[in-house]
Amino acid sequence: LECSFLSGINFLNIDRVRKVNPLLAVLKPKLVLFPEELKSWCPSKEDAPWSYLYYSKGKTIEIPNIREDFVVGLPTDVAFGLQPRQLDKAIAIARLRAKLHLSKGQYVLVAPKDQSDESNRQLLHWGAVDAGRLLSALQEKGIECAFPADNDDGSAGCERSILITSPGEALVKMAPDRTVIYCDDESTTKQIYDALSSVCNGI
């Protein structure tokens, strides 16, 4: 249940103020707003299961967003036009150009009917790169490359490199969180990127 309401407790009445904590124990709120003058009566506690904020008349306070996620509506015709890629049994991901609107208390994605320019946009890739698969993909394109002699054996969390000698000199460094291509030749860079795209998930 998500709600906000005025408790009706007269904070000038000390006996009623004492009822605040038992009331909170029943309601189990995530965030409680108290008048500043009640700070001594209802102090913030580190071990409390809810957060306290205190307000004063005529002063603005920032209320944090306590929601970790939210549901967004998508028109049926737009949903059927998506081309999702399956990440696992429960999750699929697709690319969409849209604007987030708030309508009647609900979030809605409003997308233009013409999404034709999406096919021309650069792919977005995710996930760690398999160095062995990339090496094979590069060699299939006729690129002369190899792992440097001092290259790591590929243990989890380690950086690996691929040294390219032809058709142009280049170096590809792969870490769990990023992959960087070092190359001065535009044509060679494109070939490397194409090989990289073939072994990565992308939308």
Image (cartoon, grey):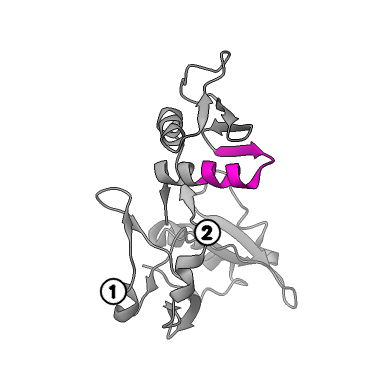
Q: Which residue is more in the foreground, 71 or 156? A: 156
Q: Which residue is drawn at the image coordinates 52% and 21% (left, top)? A: 147
- Image quadrant where one finds the C terminus: bottom left
User: Are there few (<14), some (14-19), or many (20+) residues within 10 Å of tag 2?
Assistant: few
- Whether residue 49 is visible to the viewer of this picture, yes or no, is no
Judged from the image, the secondary structure of the residue bearing numbered disc 2 is loop
In this view, the mark in front (2 or 1) = 2
Q: Which residue is more in the foreground, 181 or 146? A: 146
Q: Is residue 115 above or below residue 124?
A: below
Residue 189 sits inside the magenta stretch: yes
Residue marked by disc 2: 122
Q: Which residues are magenta?
A: 178-193
- Does residue 54 appear to the left or right of 120 in the view shown? right
Residue 68 in picture, x, y percent from top left: 47, 58
Residue marked by disc 1: 80
* Number of marks drawn: 2
Residue 78 sits inside the magenta stretch: no
Q: Amino acid at mark 1?
A: Phe
Q: Which residue is drawn at the image coordinates 46% and 20% (left, top)? A: 155
